[in-house]
Amino acid sequence: MAEMGSETIFNSAINGCSSNTEDTAGKVITCKAAVAYGPGQALVVEDVLVAPPQKSEVRVKILYTSICHTDLSALKGENEARNVFPRILGHEASGVVESVGEGVRDLKAGDKVVAVFNGECGSCKYCESTKTNLCEKFRVDPGRSVMVGDGKCRFSTKDGKPIYHFLNTSTFSQYTVINSACVAKIDPIAPLKNMTLLSCGVSSAKIHQEAVTSIFRRSLRNSSKKLRSEIPEEPQNSSINQRKKQIGK
């Protein structure tokens, strides 16, 4: 995964966005986004319209976003059944809440947050257990391309055509609208540049007491030893996917 700030993706274009939430709250925002228009096509950085957040949603100013191989797979169109375009990809990011929609109580404008692609509704059978990553409402679904609340898009082109969402987050945009269940508030002094990988890493790595685990390390000997000492089960050997190994290099 490669991290890059939105100023890197969009060059100096970010300077054209208002940082005063009083100027933008409740209004449509025009900003830059990297839009995917078809499988295998290069991303197009252009102006898009971002609607205000609706019930239980927040609009976030993205300051840093990372690229995950899942984004690349979606851009390549590797799964035809999930191909939905035009679309704004990205699901690992950190930023600041710009405004909140009706019913949002635990977040406010100015909060530092990270996007979480597999949110928690808090009421389904999985959220009431320890397997919240399987939430019936917000579980990972690369094929979902609209907001959960009303089945509509918050992104559109300048001529009003919808631009679809990705993994509940769509972070390759200077602003994005996310359900509050898919946003995690973080310490206000946390360095946002270093927080983007929490969006995926924490969600993907939780190990429970009886889990069978595999640990792959690369120049992290001390860290991996410490982790192994905290896991009671004996790690199992796993085969290495050579294609992913090359990508990781």
Image (cartoon, rainbow, N blue to C red):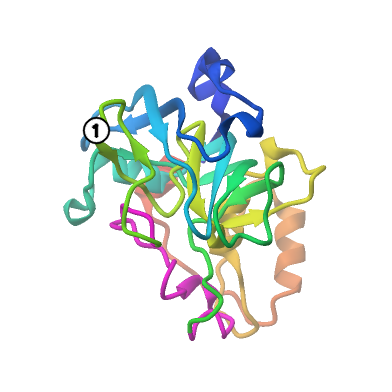
In the picture, measured across the screen, residue 197 lies left or right of residue 108, that is left
**Looking at the picture, how far across and down is residue 56, in whole percent?**
52, 60
Instruction: State which quadrant residue 85 falls in.
Output: top left
Residue 67 visible from this viewpoint: no
Residue pictured at 72% horizontal, 66% vertical: 227
- Please, which residue is most extreme toward the top here? 12
Q: Is residue 130 above or below residue 160?
A: below
**Type of amino acid at the residue the image marks with label 1:** Tyr
Which sits in the foreground, 24 or 243? 24
Q: Which residue is mark 1?
A: 37
Question: How many tags in the picture?
Answer: 1
Instruction: Give the SS element for disc 1.
Output: loop
**Looking at the picture, how far across and down is residue 94, in whole percent?**
62, 42
Instruction: State which quadrant residue 156 falls in.
Output: top left
Q: Which residues are magenta?
A: 125-148
Which sits in the foreground, 119 or 77? 119
**Looking at the picture, how far across and down is residue 95, in whole percent?**
63, 40
In the picture, measured across the screen, residue 185 lies left or right of residue 200, that is right
**Looking at the picture, how far across and down is residue 27, in whole percent?**
50, 35
In the picture, measured across the screen, residue 162 lies left or right of residue 107, that is left
In terms of secondary structure, what is the magenta stretch mainly?
loop
- Queried whether the magenta region covers residue 206, the answer comes back as no
Q: Is residue 135 above or below residue 158?
A: below
Residue pictured at 53% horizontal, 38% vertical: 66
- Please, which residue is most extreme toward the left here? 80
